[in-house]
Image (cartoon, helix red, strand yellow):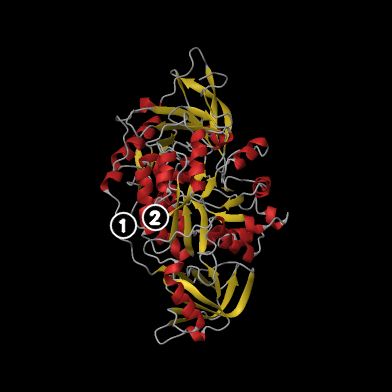
């Protein structure tokens, strides 16, 4: 399998091979030559001092000790002054929508951090706008000066029967998308029970992808590494990123999968798994680094794949191994080893110049042979891709919400209520299924701030049903009267409202209905912060700095409401993800993901 799909604006190797050969042989001048660099060769895992690199037509032509024979009168020469030249960084699994940005704005945010290739799964917008939304993401991605490959979403809804989305996708949609120029494979197969049980629809999607010679992404969010896991692997997924411990990483590579270790805004799963390499000595070429979900504040303030690589090194990984896991390993996994992921002849000329392999300062970023960023400053202009107006009207609440919509009636005759509570786990995607004894006042069950239990509600926003599902959540530590609402609610992307005050919950929900989606924080009846996300209620086409500033204000407002959890917004956004254990909320009700069943909010009561 060798996917070498190039964007329409970028020539294939075959288109430019005669020129590359001529430049390497000294018969034609290069467009660019980098001299006096330390060439980080990820194929041989070594650093070659005193190297020179020649680039022509956006690809590497010559890599070796002396490229003077490639230099002509018009050749640009960059003296690296002894800096390391490493391949542009690749993110093996991510969702652009989690950055709150469109593909174009996301690219502009991460280019200065050295990311030149992304493998993206737009299943967030797929749940809202279906194949139409996926095509828009795909087309925007192709317009960028870096490599953004799209994985066709596999699961909308992620768990059929346990949630309702704005649109559904099926095998026929997957088959259509496989012919698009930027599609690299199938997005994460989240319906792992469906695969394990031989669901014909899921297996058909996988078959269509494999018949197209493309890669199937995995998502196995279960601690069961026995027969169920073996059945899932047999179903075709080739990688997996939901691992949280060393045993997960080991099990995946032993079964022939690539283990993707993620560091996102709130997912810290590298340190707990990288010991499979650093202590157990497993072959590192079967491991890949990724981000999965990074919001705009993280991108602007902390970085992207450079942040992940640095973190892996801090966790004890050798720098060259960490760089391999963010370059050649990723390219090889997607069948693109001959196209990108290394500084070697014929590949796309994506290269970073850096002073240090451990701290990884990003001094210069070259993509497809063009310098796009220098010393953290973006040098490339914005793309001309325009998002249509019809994607800005997707919040359909069906009615004006009142405080009464968030009331939870107590069982008749009860003095107190024993309820199930969604327990947020800091820095991890899974939740805990907790229980709490709560007071009843005037026939209504009340949250308890002393126990860190507040209300959560899912407000249906796709079909204007006016439906509201109410439950309880713990982990945010909110105090006083407050509420946080978001139309980013993986993966069905209804509206999630968490709060201590039913009045503020209604205010927050209605506010997002007014602005067309986003994230808003209310306290004592007043709006503290708003992040408008008008495109599908998921993204903004404003510059990353602007969106990040609004996101920073939103995070500060959550802290003002009492939140102490790291990146609590990301935890908030995953509370409806009904394919990751243990307890979640959907428009259908409260979902126990351990059994994939709807359960009663009240303990020991059937739904």
> Quarter of the image containing the N terminus?
bottom right
Q: Position of residue 315 (x, y in %)?
A: 65, 58
Q: Secondary structure at mark 2?
A: helix
Between 478 and 187, the one nearer to me in the picture = 187
Q: Position of residue 455 (x, y in %)?
A: 46, 31
Q: In the picture shown, does residue 53 fall above or below 501?
A: below
Between 595 and 483, the one nearer to me in the picture = 595
User: Which quadrant of the structure image shows residue 126?
Assistant: top left
Spatial CA span between label 1 and label 2: 10 Å
Mark 1 surroundings within 10 Å by alpha-carbon count, few (fewer than 14), some (14 through 19), many (20 or more)? some
Q: Which residue is mark 2?
A: 103
Q: In the picture shown, does residue 271 fall above or below 537?
A: below
Please give the label number shown on residue 173: none
Between 460 and 547, the one nearer to me in the picture = 460
Q: In the picture shown, does residue 13 fall above or below 466?
A: below
Between 20 and 353, the one nearer to me in the picture = 20
Residue 566 visible in rendering: no
Q: Are marks 1 and 2 in contact (CB under 8 Å)?
A: yes
Residue 76 visible in rendering: yes
């Amino acid at each position: 399998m060798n996917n070498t799909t190039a964007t329409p604006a970028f020539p294939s190797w075959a288109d430019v091979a005669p020129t590359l050969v001529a430049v390497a042989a000294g018969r034609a001048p290069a467009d660019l030559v980098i001299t006096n660099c330390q060439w980080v060769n990820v194929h041989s895992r070594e650093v070659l001092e005193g190297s020179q690199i020649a680039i022509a037509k956006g690809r590497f032509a010559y890599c070796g000790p002396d490229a003077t024979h490639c230099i002509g009168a018009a050749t640009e020469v960059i003296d690296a002054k002894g800096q390391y030249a490493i391949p542009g960084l690749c993110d093996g699994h991510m969702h652009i929508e989690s950055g709150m940005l469109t593909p174009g704005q996301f690219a502009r945010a991460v280019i200065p951090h050295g990311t030149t290739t992304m493998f993206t799964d737009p299943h967030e917008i797929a749940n809202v706008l279906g194949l139409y939304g996926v095509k828009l993401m795909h087309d925007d991605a192709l317009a960028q000066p870096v490599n953004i490959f799209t994985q066709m979403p596999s699961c909308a809804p992620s768990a059929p029967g346990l949630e309702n989305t704005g649109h559904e996708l099926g095998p026929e949609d997957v088959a259509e998308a496989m012919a698009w120029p930027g599609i690299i494979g199938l997005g994460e197969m989240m319906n792992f029970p469906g695969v394990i049980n031989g669901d014909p629809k899921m297996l058909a999607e996988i078959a269509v992808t494999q018949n197209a010679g493309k890669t199937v992404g995995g998502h196995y969010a279960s601690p069961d590494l026995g027969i169920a896991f073996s059945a899932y692997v047999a179903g075709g997924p080739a990688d997996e990123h939901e691992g949280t411990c060393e045993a997960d990483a080991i099990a995946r590579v032993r079964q022939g999968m690539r283990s993707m270790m993620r560091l996102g805004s709130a997912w810290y799963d590298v340190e707990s798994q990288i010991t499979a390499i650093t202590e157990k000595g497993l072959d590192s070429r079967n491991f890949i680094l990724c981000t999965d979900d990074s919001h705009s504040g993280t991108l602007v303030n902390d970085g992207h794949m450079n942040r992940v690589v640095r973190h892996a090194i801090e966790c004890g990984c050798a720098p060259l191994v960490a760089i391999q896991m963010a370059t050649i390993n990723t390219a090889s996994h997607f069948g693109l080893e001959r196209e990108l992921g290394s500084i070697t002849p014929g590949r796309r000329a994506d290269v970073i110049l850096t002073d240090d392999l451990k701290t990884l300062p990003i001094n210069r970023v070259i993509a497809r042979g063009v310098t796009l960023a220098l010393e953290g400053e973006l040098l490339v202009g914005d793309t001309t891709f325009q998002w249509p107006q019809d994607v800005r009207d997707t919040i359909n609440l069906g009615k004006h919400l009142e405080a009464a919509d968030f009331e939870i009636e107590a069982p008749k005759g009860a003095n107190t209520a024993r309820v199930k509570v969604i327990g947020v786990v800091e820095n991890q995607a899974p939740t805990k299924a907790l229980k709490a004894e709560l007071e009843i006042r005037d026939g209504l069950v009340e949250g308890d701030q002393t126990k860190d239990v507040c209300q959560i509600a899912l407000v249906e926003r796709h079909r204007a049903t006016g439906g509201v599902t109410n439950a309880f959540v713990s982990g945010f530590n909110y105090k006083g009267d407050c509420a946080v609402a978001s139309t980013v609610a993986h993966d069905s992307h209804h509206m999630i409202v968490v709060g201590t005050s039913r009045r503020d919950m209604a205010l927050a929900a209605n506010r997002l209905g007014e602005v067309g989606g986003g994230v808003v924080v209310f306290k004592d009846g007043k709006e503290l912060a708003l992040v408008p996300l008008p495109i599908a209620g998921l993204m903004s086409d404003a510059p990353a700095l602007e969106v990040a500033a609004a996101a920073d204000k939103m995070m500060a407002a959550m802290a003002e409401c009492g939140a102490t959890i790291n990146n609590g917004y990301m935890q908030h956004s995953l509370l409806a993800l009904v394919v990751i254990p243990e307890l979640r909320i959907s428009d259908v009700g409260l979902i126990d993901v351990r059994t994939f069943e709807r359960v009663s909010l009240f303990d020991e009561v059937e739904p």
